[in-house]
Image: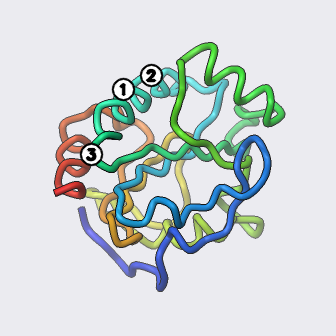
Amino acid sequence: MTTTENTAGSVLDVEIGALQGGPADLSRYTGKAVLVVNVASKCGLTPQYAGLERLHERYAPLGFTVLGVPCNQFLGQEPGSSEEIAEFCSATYGVTFPMTEKIEVNGEGRHTLYDRLVGFADAEGHSGDIRWNFEKFLIGKDGRVVARFSPQTEPEAAEVVAAVEKALA
């Protein structure tokens, strides 16, 4: 994974709401590895929720979590309310990993969380705007981005698993 400029400050210092209300309190993940993924319920890549949940279950005992970040900026593929999103994820994919409030990941309304993420380049050298739903950022134990993966990269792909294991080492 290549880096351009890792924006100052820990990603885990950012304030963001939880899907079900109240603060998400990202600081509780300090010392853990976190895979931040912008998610959507009505996307061709939505089945990745299953792989994200398996990855979460497999590595959670070692200090890892997936953090789902709903976003409706890509063809309106996450139109639901917080309650609808939570119900869909739970009922359809058995999601147990934490989710934040629905935010914008690109443009003038881009949330601070994504301001801190998008400067990091993936293995192909892409940095900047989020390309589509299910783009993935791996945050290391120190709260800094250590890897970025394209939306098409499956959550259980060898390169994702290897990066997670390295981040947990």
Tell me the kind of residue under disc 2. Answer: Ala
Which SS class for mark 2?
Answer: helix
**Dot 2: within a 10 Å radius of its alpha carbon, few (fewer than 14), some, or many (20 or more) residues?**
some
Q: Quadrant of residue 56?
A: top left
Q: The N terminus appears in which quarter of the rendering?
A: bottom left
**Residue nearest the viewer, comparing 135 with 24:** 24
Q: Residue at x 47, y 81 (%)?
A: 7
Q: How many dots with numbers?
A: 3
Q: Secondary structure beneath disc 1?
A: helix
**Circle 2 sits on which residue?**
50
Mark sitting earlier along the chain (2/3): 2
Residue type at tag 3? Leu
Q: Earlier in the sequence, mark 3 or mark 1?
A: 1
Nearer to us of marks 3 and 1 is 3
Q: Is residue 92 above or below residue 102?
A: above
Residue 77 falls in which quadrant of the image?
Answer: top right
Q: What numbered label is drawn on residue 54?
A: 1
**Do the residues bearing badges 1 and 2 touch, measured as CB atoms within 8 Å?**
yes
Residue at numbered disc 3: 62
